[in-house]
Structures are given as C-alpha cells and as structure tokens.
Amino acid sequence: MLYAVRMDVAIPSDLVPSDRADLLARERAYSQELQRSGKWLYIWPVVGMYSNLSIFDVLDNDELHEILWGLPLVRYMTITVTPMAKHPSDIHAG
Amino acid sequence: MLYAVRMDVAIPSDLVPSDRADLLARERAYSQELQRSGKWLYIWPVVGMYSNLSIFDVLDNDELHEILWGLPLVRYMTITVTPMAKHPSDIHAG
Amino acid sequence: MLYAVRMDVAIPSDLVPSDRADLLARERAYSQELQRSGKWLYIWPVVGMYSNLSIFDVLDNDELHEILWGLPLVRYMTITVTPMAKHPSDIHAG
Amino acid sequence: MLYAVRMDVAIPSDLVPSDRADLLARERAYSQELQRSGKWLYIWPVVGMYSNLSIFDVLDNDELHEILWGLPLVRYMTITVTPMAKHPSDIHAG
Amino acid sequence: MLYAVRMDVAIPSDLVPSDRADLLARERAYSQELQRSGKWLYIWPVVGMYSNLSIFDVLDNDELHEILWGLPLVRYMTITVTPMAKHPSDIHAG
Amino acid sequence: MLYAVRMDVAIPSDLVPSDRADLLARERAYSQELQRSGKWLYIWPVVGMYSNLSIFDVLDNDELHEILWGLPLVRYMTITVTPMAKHPSDIHAG
Amino acid sequence: MLYAVRMDVAIPSDLVPSDRADLLARERAYSQELQRSGKWLYIWPVVGMYSNLSIFDVLDNDELHEILWGLPLVRYMTITVTPMAKHPSDIHAG
Amino acid sequence: MLYAVRMDVAIPSDLVPSDRADLLARERAYSQELQRSGKWLYIWPVVGMYSNLSIFDVLDNDELHEILWGLPLVRYMTITVTPMAKHPSDIHAG
Amino acid sequence: MLYAVRMDVAIPSDLVPSDRADLLARERAYSQELQRSGKWLYIWPVVGMYSNLSIFDVLDNDELHEILWGLPLVRYMTITVTPMAKHPSDIHAG
Amino acid sequence: MLYAVRMDVAIPSDLVPSDRADLLARERAYSQELQRSGKWLYIWPVVGMYSNLSIFDVLDNDELHEILWGLPLVRYMTITVTPMAKHPSDIHAG
C-alpha cells in the first residue's frame, strides 16, 4: 500500500555538533536499510528546504506508523501522511 | 529533473454530462501518452479526494509548464508544483 | 485498518428539491449498508455543521478510496482522511 | 454525550529522560483508567505524528474539561474538541 | 450546559427579495422564541460583519445540533461551536 | 459597550512553581475584582484548552485596552478582541 | 473612538453595468458625506487590490456597525474591524 | 522604485470564447506596452498555475495602483504587492 | 507616499528588566522624533495586543525600509507593510 | 532556468555578537560571488522585514538546492522556491 510522506525537519541549532553528526548518520543508515527492503520507495529533498517527500510501500497504517516513529530524527520532524490509491489512468497499475 | 505536482480537481457540477465524459477521456489519453513517454513517472490519487500526487521527470521548468497547461482539465484544477533534488541518502541516486 | 474521515458537505442551494431528496435517500441507504457490513464503524455529525466524523475499518487505501468515491454526495463533499494505527495504551488493542 | 478530541503532543526535547519516562507512565495509567471507566471510548494514534484522535463519552462539557485538564501531558498538548451528536443514518443510534 | 456559537451568514445576492424578507422574518421569530425559552442566552452581532456570537444554554450536544439545524438561515451559514465549562475564577459560578 | 475577548494562555513550562502560583493568584484576584465591578461580565473556559472566552462591558476601546494590559498573565497571552453591537432580534436589547 | 476598518470588495462580474454604476455612485456619496461629518477620517486604497483601509472616529461599536451596514456595497464586502486605543508614545494623544 | 507583484488569475469558465480571446489580447498588448516603457521590468509565469510574478519599476504607490487597475484582466485577478528596497549586498545596487 | 504598517511585538519574557526598560525608552524616543518629523503620521495600539497600526508618509520604499530597520525593537517585531494610494472618493485627496 | 526564492531570516537574538557578525559577512561574500557568476540574478529586501526576494538562473533543481544549502544563514531561514517559466507576453523572452 502506498503513502506519500512529507517530512519537515527542524533540528535545534544549539544541538552539540557530535550529537548532531551521530543523529544524521543513524538517520541515513535507518533510511537506506528501509530503501533496500523496498519499504521506502523514494526519498526526494524539496529544493531549498530541510524537507523531503518520500513514498512508502508498506503493509498497513500500523507498519508505517512504526517505521516513522523509529526515525532517529522523528523528534525534530513535522510529518504529514497522505494515503494513496491506484489511479484508473495509471498505465503501471495493471 | 524531478517535480512533485499535486492536482486538486473541481469540475463544476453543472457541466453537461457528455462534455464531462469527453473531457475525462481526453485527460486520460493525454496523461497516458505522457506516462508512456516517461515524462509523467507516477500518478497516485489521494484517498477520498478528487486529487492526485504526480511525479514528473522533465527537462526544465518550461517543459513542465507546457505539459501542465496542456491538461484538458487544467481550467478546473488547483496545481501546486514542488521542485525536487537528489537526496544524499537515496540509494538509487548513485 | 482504521481511518478517521471527516466529510464537510455543501449541497448547492439551487438543487431541485426532488433531486436533493433522492440524493439524500441514496446517501442514507449507501451508508447504512456499509455500516451493516462493518466497514463504516461510526458516523457522528459535528454539532452545528453539515459535517460528520466517521470511522472506517477497511482492507486498505484502495478500498477506502472506492467506498468514498461511491458516496452519492461525494461531488458536494470536502473529505479529509486520517490514517490511524493502534495505540500502545489502548486497552482494547490487545 | 460524545466528543471527538484531537491531542497533538510536543514534549520539549530537553526534558530530563527520567521525568519524561515518569510523565508517560502517569499519562498511560490515567488514560487506561478512564478507558476502563467507559469515559474514554477510543484512542487512535494518527499515523506518523505524536497525536491521537480520541472519542469521549461523558456527562457534559465540565466533566470533559476536568478530564482533559487532568492529563499529565496536558501542558505539552494542543487540544481540539469537537462536540458530536447522533446521526439520523446511524444504525446504532436506535 | 454552555456553548459559544459563531454564525457567519452569506445569503446569495440573487435571492428573490420577497424570499429573503420571509427568510429573515422566520429567522427572527425562531431566534426570539428560543431566547424567551432561555435556551438562546445572548445574541451579539459582530461589528461590521453579517455574523453574530451567540451563547446557548442547552441540555446537551444533540439539543444544540437540533436547534442550529432548525435555523431558517442555516443553509447560508458557516457555524463554529465552542463548548464551554465553568471557570474557577467565575464569581457567578457558585 | 460590549466586547468578546478570547484569551489563549501559554505559560512557559520552565517558570519557577512559586512564581507561577503567585501569578495565577494575582490573575484570579484581578479578574474577580473586575467581575464584581460589572466590567468583566462573563468568563468561560474553552473545553480542553488553556483559553477562555470573556465578555466585557466597558466605556470604550481605551478602557478595554487598559484592563487587558493590566492582566498579570498578559505577557503569556494571545488575545483576540471582537467588538459587538446590539442585535435587532435581541429581546433583551429593548 | 478610533477603529481601523479593512474593506475587501468583490462585486459579481455579471452585475448589470448600470446597476454597478449606480451602486458605486451611491457608495461614493455615502462615504463622502461621512468624511465631511468627521466620522470617516481616512480612506486609503490598498495598492493593486479592490480594498481600502479606513479609519473611523465614532461614538461606539453600535454607531460603527450601523455605518458599515449602511454601505451600499456592504453585500459585496468582507470587512475586518480593529478597535484601536491611544498610544503612550503618540505625540498627538496629549 | 521596485515592487514584486504576484497576479493569480481566475477567468470564469463560462465566459464567451470571443470575449475571452479579446480580453487576453488586450491584456497582452497592455502588458507589452508597459514592458517597452520600462515600467514592467519582468513577467514570469509560475509553473503549473495561471499566475505570474512580475517586477515593476515605477514612481510611487499611486502609479503602480493606476497601472494594476488598468489591467484588462484585473477583475479576475487576486493581486499581492510586495514593496522592495535596495539590498546592501546587491552588487548592482551601486 | 503613504504606507500602513502593522507591528506585532514579542519581547522574550526572559529579557533582563533593565535592558527591557532601556529598549522601550529608546523605541519611544525614536518613534516620537519621527512623529515630529511628519514621517510617522499616526501610531495606534491594537486593543488587547502588543501591536500597533501606524501610518507613514515617506519618500519611497527605501526610506521606509531604513526607518523600520532602525527601530530599536525591530528584532522582536513581525512587521507587515501595506502600500497605499489616493482614493478617488477621498475628499482630502484634492 | 529561473526560480523566485523568498528567504525569511530569523537569527536567534541570543547569538553571540561576534558570531553574528562573522555569519553575516560570510553570507554577504557568498551571495556576491554568486551574483558575479550570474547565478544569483537579483536580491531585493522586502520592505520592513528580514526577508528578501531573489531571482536565480541555474542549470536545474539540484544546482539550486546545492546553492541554497550552502548559504551560511540557511539554518536560520525559511525558504520558499517558486519555479518560473517564460511568459508568452514577455517581450524579452524572444
């Protein structure tokens, strides 16, 4: 099942640099593992902003909720989730 | 170059049924041709709404503008365009 | 899977009374059938507004999209869908 | 009487971990007691957000106000209350 | 139980004058009867707008919903309902 | 002259408890004195929020501004003022 | 007493030209009479918009409400009223 | 003096085609004449929308107001004006 | 040339009292000097808020920008600038 | 390719003055270098605000994203990017 997820990130500017670097490294590893698993289909940064638009393909709402709550950066994120369906005109939808 | 495009559609409820059917058929054909060309990568309806989230891969702003202005339904659409870049964590970005 | 769906209804005031009555009757029948099927769990009107908050329990995004697009009143509705998960404190969640 | 209550939580990221854990434990106990009492009918997390949609069945506005002000987390919450009525199409409304 | 109700009115400018006059007369009569009954405590126009802020004292959500849906002008209104409780500092609250 | 005043309060969570208690006591005393004077007609908490809707009956804009700026909590408040008039349907308006 | 009043005007584009001209003439006469009376202190168009910012000096809320409801264009206006007081730094406030 | 002007256009879909064509032609001529005069420095369409961002260099507020009110399409436009100054870092500002 | 300027002030509550007093004194002096010069025509506090609506009469955008950036409080302000023109109905506009 | 970029800046008021000065100097140098390269076509401050409207001419989304993320002040900025195309009425568009 597909979801579009918009993540707007705001890391406090007074976070200790080493903590910040560690956090970003863990976020990157977490994301790439999910990408390899096929759950996290796409991740595109929004030009000029500390935000991304991602497409997830997961079993259901609960799995997505668990994945998003597992994000190391989740505490500093505003997340918007848009559930998506198949479009009748989608030539890939078969 | 990638863009996320949100299209919210509001067709006047007093449109003559035959005009409405013709319009939707032309929209479908227009979209599917662009999908086959690889310009229109994805089209996902937003659950519960007469809206879709689409991903376009085009040369530049002008080409996207031309494509969107060619949509038969454009007159009844509110369109939001989000330019996107490559994410450093994107395992597909190479 | 659970979704909260808010439906704000705005029927054009110039709709022919008989059409309006027929539309409302079909909407009522459609809703009650889905309630009996267990898909449409709850429907509560929002006090003072032509809106309701409903809770749906369906297979996935696509099924919900199909149900909502089948609503006789859908053309006159603004619909917002909130995907929901299980809460760790929910004593019913087992 | 029924109310839909949306709770958006934002706990300051610099809260001492032990205080945070204690706060969450008290919140969980407080909520589960009210669930067992039948006052707090449902609690569903909103996917991807530190928010929940809850349904309360209480005597009146004052009781709901007292319950919500008793939440251990209330200081870190933005709460929206939607009073709800019985829907004429609700097959359970009798 | 107390509710603050904001009513923003927008009567279509092309409504036949006699219908408009009739509608306003019925609205006035309906409101004054409820005021005499003590249900509709106060009605204050918002300066410069076709809106009013009203205070209702009714049994519960359902009664308020019924009253508001009975307003002759309801079809042309945007209504916002704010449930209110007793304030600990309120010298009248006893 | 009547005004509806909405006060949304946000006291910093790191305020020293004794200062907080003193502040609330002074706010309560200040409000009750104005209630006894008839200037502050009503004060109703909005269910679930640290907000109240109050009705003031004062000489003019300046007096209201002075009263509101005298609130001990004013520094932590977002205040919205709605000037109100007499409604032609108001049976009490004489 | 001073009020800032913002008037955003939206005259239906299908209004009969002669009606439109008559309406604008009556609006102009109505405004200029109030300006001569000193009630309507200033009227400044907002650059690029069919809106103006006006300053009124009137007895009280009721008088302002009456004046604004007397505007020939009021039916096509969105009006926002901001009550204003005397500023301690205002060298004219005496 | 420089202003950024955003123009969002919404031409009623039921406008007679010949009127629409004439209107667009007059708008184009009006704009190009001002461009040649150096008043209308730039006009860029916003991708995907019937909107443009324009930069004007005019004497003062009044001249801009006159120019914008002279636009043949002004009746169908929502216009936002942003007054701009010289930036200390602007290498062209001299 | 005329501008309406809305200034919403939010001074951090943890500012050292003496710094705060000095800041306010410098703001007052700065404003009164500009008022005496005729640049700052009017300054009206918005009832109940730490905001004012001011009217400026200056040469051009740059001068206004310089004046506003010179405000001692500017760092704690949200400022909105509305450029204004002469109204054809304005009896003072000559 | 052209983009309009709005930058709203909010530097924490408790930033050490020397750090602030260094940051602003680096921002100025960074911007002027890009202006000289022709990438950063225009930079206009918005009157009264710590914001600017800039026009960029770059290869594609990725280049713009890189440029904006390289801004020394980016951490304290809210950035909105509007992709722009060529206007058919633009006399310079050739």
Image (cartoon, coloured by chain):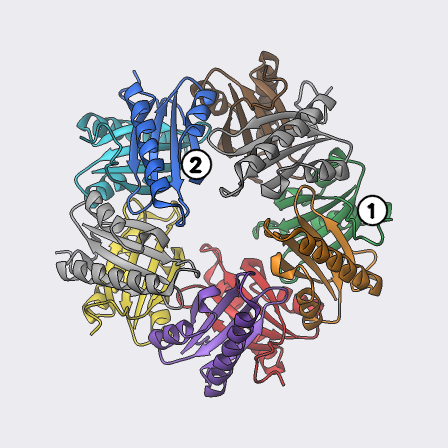
Chain colours: B brown, C green, D orange, E red, F purple, G yellow, H cyan, J blue
Where's residue E31, x and y in %? 57, 74
Determine the residue positioned at 60% across, 19% down.
B41
Determine the residue positioned at 60% across, 24% down.
B89
Give the chain letter at badge 1: C
Q: Residue E42 falls in which quadrant of the image?
A: bottom right
Q: Which residue is mark 2?
A: J79
Where's residue B1, x and y in %? 51, 18
Q: Quadrant of the N terminus of chain D?
A: bottom right
Q: Which residue is mark 1?
A: C33
* Relative to G52, residue E57 above or below: below
In the depicted view, which residue is nearer to us: G36 or D5?
A: D5
Indicate the amino acid at tag 2.
Answer: Ile
**SS class, disc 1:** helix
* Relative to E47, residue J51 above or below: above
Q: Residue C81 falls in which quadrant of the image?
A: top right
Give the chain letter at badge 2: J
**SS class, disc 2:** strand
For residue B37, side relative to residue C26 (left or right): left
**Exactly how many numbered labels are in the figure?**
2
Indicate the amino acid at tag 1.
Answer: Glu
* Relative to G65, residue H93 above or below: above
Which label lies toward us, 2 or 1?
A: 2
Judge whether residue F55 can be spotted in this image.
yes
For residue E5, side relative to residue F94 (left or right): right
